[in-house]
Amino acid sequence: MGLLDGKVALVTGGSRGIGAAIVRRFAEQGANVAFTYRSSAEQANALAAELEQLGVTAKAYQSDASDYEAAENLAKEVLEAFGQVDILVNNAGITKDTLMLRMTEAHWDDVIQTNLKSIFNLTKHLIRPMMKNRGGSIINMSSIVGMTGNAGQANYAASKAGIIGFTKSIAKEMGSRNIRCNAIAPGFIETDMTESLDEKVREGYLQNIPMNRLGKAEEVADVCVFLGSDLSTYLSGQVISVCGALNT
């Protein structure tokens, strides 16, 4: 038996990186999974086919979580196909890093729209179905940068800090309805982006991480499994840092 048997999860930005690791872990633990992607249909559909080999239902949806109407349509399609959504993972996000002196309005707006408004969009459209289902778990992907700030990432840090405030507010609003809302704040995780880092930059990161290594996407996904499962039924409004003690 899996920790998520019988549950339905929706993961935004689920075709690659941390999102794909979450989708795989959920399927391995018995959840039926819907996930979104922006551009690579072939990669997303291949992942869905891979997951169905585990005996669960999996479906990829091309959708822009930052678009309010698209998010509404996505929620309707997933509810029609799966019947319910027990776990929502708001994972979609981008970076457009630059110092404030060089940051344009587009740099700011694009990051806030994708990282923060998308959280509002999907939560807004799935809160009522979760209330009707008498429960649910919302997991929002923040970042340690949202807790500490980082030079050259004012837009990203603001979006991720906003996610934390949003998470705590929804936890307080929806606690009486048995809907939990938590955030995960990953540190430096092995992804396509970190693989392309200059070796000196990578070493600089490692020197500041007490565990002396980058995290794995699967280690973030494992925390998502915990938060989505019945092992965390009294945990809400919290921010869990997955950072190797970097933010300590």
Image (tube, rainbow, N blue to C red):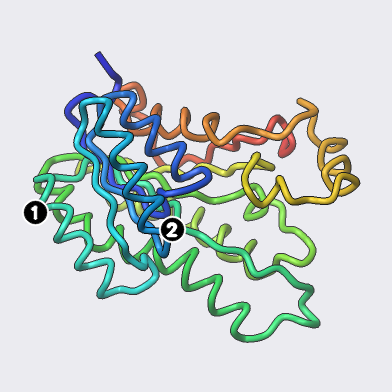
Question: Within the image, what quadrant is residue 219 found in?
Answer: top right
Q: Which residue is mark 1?
A: 80
Type of amino acid at the residue the image marks with label 2: Phe
Count of numbered marks: 2
Q: Given this view, does label 2 or label 1 mark the residue nearer the observer?
A: 1
Residue at 77% across, 67% down = 152
Q: Which mark is residue 231?
A: none
Q: Position of residue 128 (x, y in %)?
A: 16, 56
The amino acid type of the residue labelled 1 equals: Glu
The Cα–Cα distance between marks 2 and 1, rounded to whole angstroms, is 27 Å
The picture places residue 9, in percent across and down from the top left corner, at 27, 41
Disc on the earlier residue, 2 or 1: 1
**Quadrant of residue 86 in the image?**
top left
Q: Residue at x 59, y 84 (%)?
A: 106
Q: Where residue 117 appears, x then y in whole percent?
A: 42, 69
Q: Residue at left 28%, top 39%?
A: 49
**Disc 2 element:** helix
Q: Which residue is mark 2?
A: 166
